[in-house]
Image (tube, rainbow, N blue to C red):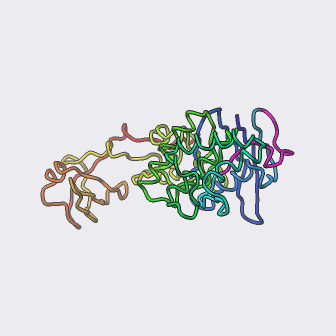
Amino acid sequence: MLEIIDIHKRYGDRVAACGLSLTLAAGEVVALLGPSGCGKSTLLKLIAGLEAPDAGIVRFDGADLARVSPDARGFALMFQDFALFPHLDVLGNVMFGLRERRVAREEARTRACAMLAELGLDGYQARRVWTLSGGEAQRVALARALVTRPRLLLLDEPFSSLDAHLRQGLQQDFRRLLGKQGIPALLVTHDRAEAFAMADRVALLCDGRIQQCATPAALLAAPATPWVARFIGYENLLSDAVVPERAFRLGAGQAPARVEDVVPLAEGMRVRVETALGRFVLTLSAREVAACGGQLHPGGEIGVGIDRDALLRFDRG
């Protein structure tokens, strides 16, 4: 198990980690999610041993890694630029880490071919890496990372350069292979959908601090702060809670709200309104649009209320 305990790291005036603590269980995938510059990649480098913390402890299976060199930690890193070796063919790239670990050539070849087949690249062994598509190159990079059976896999925005279709396919293969091999992984991403699709837990970082760490379902059900709520996609907030769509009540019996903007949708309408409690964005079904009569236009007025029992209240802890 990975343990990160009260890690601090500064670069001049910039705080990259401030009292940051996190655990990763055997076989678990945790996503580090946050905006650019929040400390995600720095934390990955601290775990890998590419950077040293100013204070704090990084442990794996109970052993302090402070004096353990990066190559002796048994971790694998995978980056968004693939970092394939242009002088080696596909098979040579996948075998590279095994040969560095002094695995016999034939065993390394057998394991590399099996991993390529797992990722749909059987028959690609002799291909030169510059002839590969982006998705193929990323699969080779993934095969190279997994074939060594690392104790921990560290991934820094590994799918960000791929289009949506390729990214989804690779995410599915990634989860399947990690589950099959039982390899724990830490995934750095700024993509909420990617984090929620791939991770068992998501750690939300801002300014070098973890704001909340929970399962995707728990984050959606109970965001801890307004910042977390906005970052994971909620638009409608009060000072103490998220207002989910189910909490809105429409109709003549509700308080009047002024319509500020409307955007037609395939099966309804997106409406921005101003109420006594603030501005909110509503996604209305075709039936709800019809019930509002002719008032859904800028300057129109509809009835909008909030069921406070349906709010998602922030944990002020």
Between residues 300 and 111, which one lies in front from this camera angle? 111
- Left or right: 270 as drawn, with respect to 136: left
Q: Position of residue 305 (x, y in %)?
A: 28, 47
Task: Name the residue rendered at 45%, 48% in the picture.
Answer: 169
Q: Position of residue 60 (x, y in %)?
A: 75, 37
Q: Is residue 50 above or below residue 313?
A: below
Quarter of the picture containing the N terminus is top right
Magenta-drawn segment:
62-77
Q: Is residue 105 visible?
A: yes
Q: Position of residue 85 (x, y in %)?
A: 66, 60
Task: Name the residue rendered at 58%, 40% in the picture.
Answer: 114
Asked whether 68 falls inside the magenta stretch, the response is yes
- Left or right: 126 as drawn, with respect to 276: right
Image quadrant assignment for residue 282: bottom left
Q: Position of residue 211 (x, y in %)?
A: 60, 47
- Left or right: 285 as drawn, with respect to 162: left
Task: Name the residue rendered at 62%, 42% in the picture.
Answer: 185
